[in-house]
Image (cartoon, grey):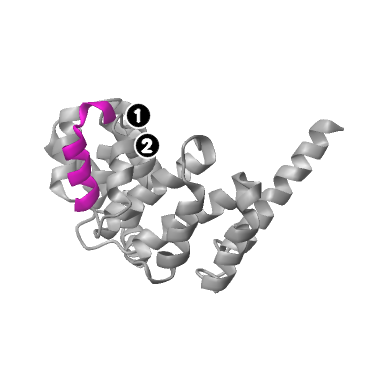
Amino acid sequence: MTPDEALAELEALGTEKQRELNRRWGAGDDQFGVKLGDIRAIAKRINTDHELALHLWASGNVDARFLAILVLRPKALSADELDAMVRSERFTRVADWLNAYVVRKHPDREQLRVVWLTDDDAMAARSGWDLTAQRAAKDPDGLDVSGLLDRLERDMGEAPEPAQWTMNSTLVEIGIHFPEHRQRAIEIGERLGVYSDYPDRKGCISPFAPIWITEMVGRAEVEAGIRAG
């Protein structure tokens, strides 16, 4: 599939309803408005095509970038190329796909994480804190948890929204996975009040850290009790 063919297929699948939904989430006008399920179906047909992915990403189109993320090879990107991709995207839904499907799989993710944590670019910081949340949950060895809590307590309340979201995720993962730091994580969340007034969504846990931590710890305790029984 050529870049022009991919863009034409995406354009044909776009709807105004999806474009408006994307706008409410923060997307700009360079989009076709394709449902994510339809984008996944195209990606499944393509499988992997790194060169196509680079062309699609360079287009700047929202839907093309979603597709690019699914068909590129993370390990084929240099650290500098990935850094440029992270900084070039301002729509957080695309950025989160990039983090989930590419950044977390990149061989240089730890080096990039350290750099991004102190970066003034909000999207680079979003990626850095996303990687930190992942480490807190899955690979905590060597992680300076007390130092991270100090930074979160100092900076999260005034952080730009893109970075604040994944900073909050890091606070939550620390509270869930580090019992010795749980009370402090909850107290930081209560003191800062980040997302304390977030709208309720049916079937979703509040992103307010004290609620999120308490809910997830409670679920884990119930599951542990069931297994023990």
Q: Is residue 17 something one can see in this rendering?
A: no
Q: Position of residue 102 (x, y in %)?
A: 32, 36
Helix, strand or loop at disc 2? Answer: helix
Provide residue 205's location: percent of width, then percent of height.
Answer: 61, 58
Q: Secondary structure at mark 1?
A: helix
The chief SS type of the magenta part is helix
Under mark 1, the amino acid is: Lys
Q: Which residue is mark 1?
A: 44
- The relative height of residue 193 versus residue 53 in the rendered view (above or below) is below
Q: Which residue is pictured at 64% across the width and 62% down the height?
A: 211
Q: Tell me the CA gap for discs 1 and 2.
A: 21 Å
Is 16 a magenta residue? no
> What is the crowding at mark 1: few (fewer than 14 residues within 10 Å), some, or many (at least 20)?
few
Residue displayed at 61% across by 57% down? 212
Indicate whether 110 appears above or below 34.
above
- Image quadrant where residue 185 sits: bottom right
Q: Residue at x 17, y 32 (%)?
A: 52
**Which is nearer the eye, 154 or 16?**
154
What's drawn in magenta, residue-wise? 74-88
